[in-house]
Image (cartoon, grey):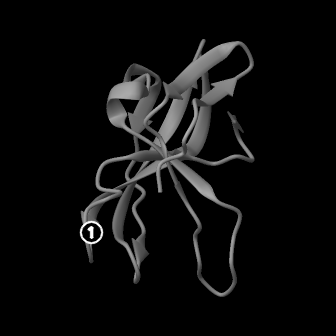
Amino acid sequence: MPAGNRRTVSLGDTVIADSVNAVVVKEVGRGVYDPVVYFPRADVEMDLLDRTDKSTHCPLKGDTEYFDLVIAGGRTPDVAWSYVKMILGDELFELISFDGSKVAVS
């Protein structure tokens, strides 16, 4: 579902993503989780993200790739993920989501 307003991701004073085209998803698993915001890659400072070897598989959505955040010589591991292979549909394909415990998502 479209977020309906501007969404951002930041760490300190550094803006990592800024979008009016973000998508909000209510994730489910063993329970219902807080909504997750996914950003189009065009609205993410991809030069701040370094793809890692980590990947996961969600039986409902598909396969992911992960990214570390690299800012001013510091590295925040596994701060973002993106679905690169979808099981059903493609509404999240290659959108980027961020771990709200590691960066500010608003």
Residue nearest the viewer, comparing 72 with 1: 1
Q: Please indicate whether residue 20 sits to the left or right of residue 7 in the image.
A: left
Q: Please indicate whether residue 45 sits to the left or right of residue 30 in the image.
A: left
Residue at x 25%, y 70% (from the top left corner): 89
Local secondary structure at mark 1: strand
State whether residue 50 is above or below residue 13. Answer: below
Residue farthest toward the bottom in the current orientation of the protein: 30
State whether residue 42 is above or below residue 51. Answer: above
Res 83 quadrant in image: bottom left
Residue at x 41%, y 33% (from the top left corner): 50
Res 69 quadrant in image: top right
Total number of numbered discs in the rendering:
1
Q: Residues within 10 Å of mark 1 (few under 14, many from 20)?
A: some
Q: Please indicate whether residue 59 sits to the left or right of residue 99 in the image.
A: left
Res 74 quadrant in image: top right
**Residue 41: x percent and y percent?**
35, 34
**Residue 10: x percent and y percent?**
65, 25
Q: Which residue is mark 1?
A: 86
Residue nearest the viewer, comparing 60 with 20: 20
**Residue 55: x percent and y percent?**
39, 62
**Residue 81: x percent and y percent?**
46, 51
Q: Please indicate whether residue 62 sits to the left or right of residue 18 in the image.
A: left
Residue at x 39%, y 20% (from the top left corner): 47
Assign the C terminus to one quadrant of the image: top right
Amino acid type indicated by mark 1: Met
State whether residue 21 is above or below residue 38. Answer: above
Residue farthest toward the front in the current orientation of the protein: 4
